[in-house]
Amino acid sequence: MNILGIDIGGTGIKGAIVDTKKGELKSERFRIDTPKPSTPDAVAGTILKIKNHFSWNNDIGCCFPSVVINGNAKFSSNLDPKWKGVQIDALFSKACDGLEFNIINDADAAGIAEMNFGVGKDKKGLGLMITIGTGIGSGMFYDGQLIPNTELGRIFGHDGDLFENYTADSARKNENLEWHEWGKRFNKYLNHLVRIFSPDFFILGGGASKKMEKFENELNVDTPIYVSKNLNNAGIIGAAFNVIEPHH
């Protein structure tokens, strides 16, 4: 079954039609810059543009960069503060002629794509999907089952600050860090997660995961690390698949 999947990020909003049986894009990906300011109404208008681009008139799966419980944004995360408490599915549905929206956390969606169609397929035990982008997102899985809405970027660890502020890809860009410098930071973060959770494997996704060869020499964790097969399409694929097989 084909479903339109949309991935809302801090810098871009991307959509594509997904074959949910194969976990593959059936269309070219269509991207629009995240509006500034990224208010709920502005983002809803962008979602409408993506829907119209694909002439789509069916259910839509959408992943969102915040804790999402029953379609509600619990925090604003890297978007406009007005998002906190917004009923995302109702807002988008109203903007898009009443179409049904299924909303899920973005890193959870990326993890769903990897656990069903990517490097996590058939892997057992505790797996942590870490997405490295504007922020740090996380998806936690045990024997392939999602444990939703973990926010492991929000762990305090470096000088009393959030690890996200220290080790997201945006920190690398903002501080003009070389990849090996940033890699040392990311290694510290992964080792911290190992100490807390003792995961059986990591899956890295998000923009920085495409540059793994530039920082992998800095990583010394004993836990196996895999790079997302679906890379930046993982959120779109997972959001679409979640419409067919909801993960709670």
Image (cartoon, grey):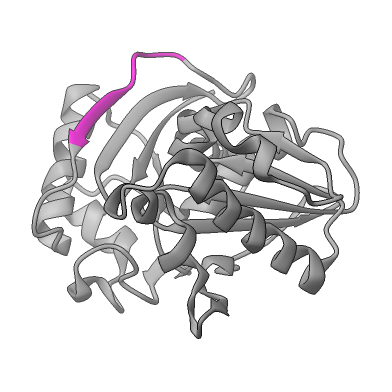
Q: In which quarter of the image is the C terminus?
A: bottom right
Q: Where is residue 42 in the image (x, y as percent from the top left)?
A: 10, 54
Picture coordinates of residue 117, whole percent (x, y): 69, 28
Q: Position of residue 199 (x, y in %)?
A: 83, 58
- Above or below, 152 against 207 in this view is below
Task: Residue 121 in the image: state x and y as whole percent.
Answer: 79, 33
Inspect this view and state whether residue 220 appears: yes
Taking the view exactly as shown, the residue that stands out farthest to the right is 124
Residue drawn at (60%, 68%) of the image: 150
| Quarter of the picture holding the N terminus | top right
* Viewer-closest of 9 and 179: 179
Residue 118 quadrant: top right
Relative placement, left or right, of 43 versus 179 is left
User: Can residue 248 be seen from the camera position used here?
Assistant: no
Residue at image coords 51%, 73%? 154
Q: In front here: 147 or 60?
A: 147
Left or right, 45 with respect to 195, comes to left
Position of residue 72 relative to residue 56, above or below, is below
Find the magenta span and give its range.
26-32
Label count reads 0
Determine if the magenta segment contains residue 245: no
Quarter of the figure with residue 36? bottom left
> What residue appears at the point 15 percent right and 58 percent down from the top-left corner?
38
Q: In the rendered view, tell whether residue 138 sits above or below residue 20.
A: below
Residue sitting at 25 percent across and 53 percent down? 93
**Residue 27 included in the magenta stretch of the image:** yes
